[in-house]
Image (cartoon, grey):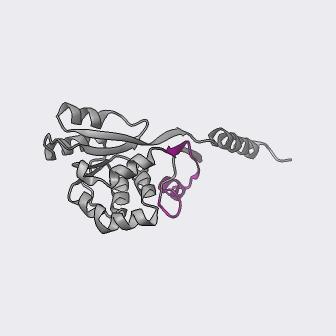
Amino acid sequence: MHVLLLKEPRDGESGPDPYIKELVSHGHKATLIPVLSFKFVSLNTLSDKLFQPEKHKGLVFTSPRAVEAVKMCLEAEERREEWNSSVKDKWNNKSIYVVGKATGALVRNLGLNPLGEDTGTAEVLSRVIIEREDTNILPLFFPCGSIKREVLPTALRENGVPLETLTVYQTAEHPDLEKNLKNYFTEQVQKLRPHF
């Protein structure tokens, strides 16, 4: 059987996608076609906020893309040096919340110590945050995507935990999705035609 996976490849992993690896191990063929693309926005604002940790109670990351946006802000050598010499430690004295092990690993690569990797969803993470945080004047800072769900912001707001959000990436259809699908199905049809 040939399986078509319509998903994003895993970032930062070497070798084949784990889904393809699993399918192949069971004797299937698999093709992965990416369906989404991401455009990073508001990076100057994000950078300003990252380098003023005193204005926030902590950080919240619910996606690897948000961490990628932070990493982009640290690409300039002088920013990276400032981050490593003092800013990172100031953030580590605060709460750094994440959803999932993949996001947690990326946050750790920034030199930060994440909490909540085992939560798995924004809903569960919001309960962890509500248990740990009081209604402080300083908000948690939440860099996020344009199509984030409102579960976490709503839960925190309803429980008096201040949260400041900033959209740092926009999600759109992958520019080559239609072309890649046409090519895939054309190839599959050609394989089915009898060869005389």
Who is closer to the viewer here, 82 or 176? 82
Residue 126 position (above or below residue 78)? above
User: Does any portion of residue 12 appear in the rendered image?
Assistant: yes
Residue 122 position, x and y percent, is: 30, 41
Residue 54 position, x and y percent, is: 23, 52
User: Does any portion of residue 123 appear in the rendered image?
Assistant: no
Residue at image x 40%, y 54%? 70
Q: Which residues are magenta?
A: 12-40
Residue 93 position, x and y percent, is: 20, 59
Residue at image x 69%, y 39%? 182
Residue 167 position, x and y percent, is: 41, 40
Residue at image x 42%, y 65%? 78
Q: Is residue 177 magenta?
A: no
Who is closer to the viewer here, 20 or 87? 87
Residue 91 position (above or below residue 148)? below
Who is closer to the viewer here, 188 or 140? 140
Residue lying at the far right of the rendered structure:
196
Horizontal side of 82 relative to 18 (left or right) equals left
Quarter of the figure with residue 164: top left
Horizontal side of 82 relative to 72 (left or right) equals left
Horizontal side of 142 relative to 65 (left or right) equals left
Q: Is residue 18 magenta?
A: yes
Horizontal side of 157 relative to 143 (left or right) equals left
Q: How many marks?
A: 0
